[in-house]
Image (cartoon, rainbow, N blue to C red):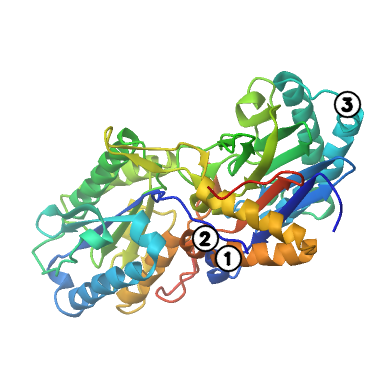
Amino acid sequence: MKQTDWIYAYASIIGSGHLINNTNCQDYCEVHDFDNYIIAVVSDGAGSCEHSEKGSRLVASVSVPHFYNAVKENGWNENKELPNEDEWQHIAIKTLRRIREDLYNYSIAQQLEFKSLSCTVIVVIAFKHGLLVTHIGDGRAGYCNVNLLWKSMIKPFHGELANQTVFITSDIWYEEVVDTYIESNVVKEDVRAFCLLSDGCEKASFECNLYDKEKQAYFDPNRPFSLFFNPNVTALQQLSEQKQSQEEINLLWEKFLTAGTEKLKLESDDKTLILAIKADNKISES
Amino acid sequence: MFAGESPENFEQKCICVLVVDISGSMAGEPLNQLNIGLQEFSKEVEKDFVATQRLEVSIVTFGSTAQCIQEPALISNITMPTLYPSGSTRLVDGVRLGMDIVEKRKNWYRDTGQNYFRPMIVLITDGEPDSDQDINGLSSEVASAITAKKFMFYSLGVRGYNHQKLSLICSTPPPLPLDGYKFSEFFKWLSNSIGIITKSVEGQTLSLPPVSDWTQIQM
């Protein structure tokens, strides 16, 4: 196992709905270690688009080198101070545009309709001293601070209907509207752990559709569920201490995402979840 | 070893209004099979936990009059009715009532902060509307509602139905002729479709499972 600042587990699992329809898993994820930071990407293909699994695979894989270049160009890998929110949003949009261009070129080369490759994307770059996150579409991402408090770090974009969102292929790139659809945030506090996930995992791991009896209304607190994450942070720490390989950790994680809780077991959508913890910290299960 | 608890999130809702022809011509085998199909529908939904939490069903019947015999409710709160034949074919009134139920339910979802999937209206008929029914008016109402993505509309033609008249009400998607009286297969498909609604781009139709088990044509 690599000796880095972060320990992580990641997997994408095909949903039962896609098994019934005989379609491929449309989620993809990537985690790459660099000297003192990692880049984690989750991309979720649109179920209604014919080749979205190709789109999500390409977007997940090309996001890593593009954001690696962004880190290098800005010296964040050399412990230079992380950007403010506006600077990061500007850099993230510029980088996502390059990823979109790669996807467009791929569509031309493969003679596929560009929008048939529609997919969302969430990117987290984790440094020892903070996180950079950017995303297009839905899904969730959150982190745990030194006070063991889990917080969300993005807000999923939803259309009028529950299953509608925007994708990297959508017409969202005009200067006047791009900030509405692309959200980028900077976390500068000391982070113990973080997660990013496709919407197929959100009902199992985030509080996202609760009922307020007093107001007699439903609401989305968009809050990572500590009883879901904390035991897994501990398990990940233990697996690392036992010198389990990344492949072994991911296999166990796959098994957990398949049926580790009743909600995960019943989910019909594809499920992707990346969980990362700082190597030198521990979180108790309380 | 990995383990954890999941929070008590509620499912997003999907309202499906069944607008069902109970006119005299549906007497006998068609209604018998439809009644069996409704019972099967209920059992099929109950097998799928997500669908039990997501699907709200409302039933409108039309014969000599159109009436809502089941207000929107989760399957677990519904006792499926037994339908009996009744007179002529107030089809247009039935569909309009179905559209009204969809609109009211959507407003209720919004007022109570609930996310919802695109509503579905399913028209089941073996005949054609009474001659004084405003089929052209309904046609334009359905067309503009579909253009505005207010709901999805499926019409299911039971043996002897008038394809041309039914196509006037909704041509996209076209009416689907039911193979024999395979209501049970149709409702099984409907139940599966609700459980696996996937992410879509604004304006796109949903990718539903193949329909070959219960119709004579492919969509």
Q: Give how far across and how far down residue A132 sits, in percent.
A: 73, 32
Residue topped by disc 2? A264
Q: Earlier in the sequence, mark 2 or mark 3?
A: 3
**Helix, strand or loop under label 1:** helix
Q: Are marks 1 and 3 in contact (CB under 8 Å)?
A: no
Instruction: Give me the residue at 42% from left, 66% from top.
Output: B192
Query: In the image shown, does A50 or B11 lie closer to the viewer?
Result: B11
**Helix, strand or loop under label 3:** helix
Q: Earlier in the sequence, mark 1 or mark 2?
A: 1
Do the residues marked 1 and 3 share a common chain?
yes
Q: Give how far across and how far down residue B11 sits, in percent.
A: 40, 51
Residue topped by disc 3? A74
Mark 1 to mark 3 CA distance (whole Å): 39 Å
Q: Which image quadrant for residue A155?
A: top right
Assess disc 2: are there few (<14), some (14-19) or many (≥20) residues with their C-alpha within 10 Å of its C-alpha.
many
Residue topped by disc 1? A258
Q: Residue under mark 3: which chain is it in?
A: A
Q: Residue under mark 2: which chain is it in?
A: A
Q: Residue under mark 1: which chain is it in?
A: A
Specify the amino acid type for callout 2: Leu
Specify the amino acid type for callout 1: Thr
Q: Are marks 1 and 2 in contact (CB under 8 Å)?
A: yes
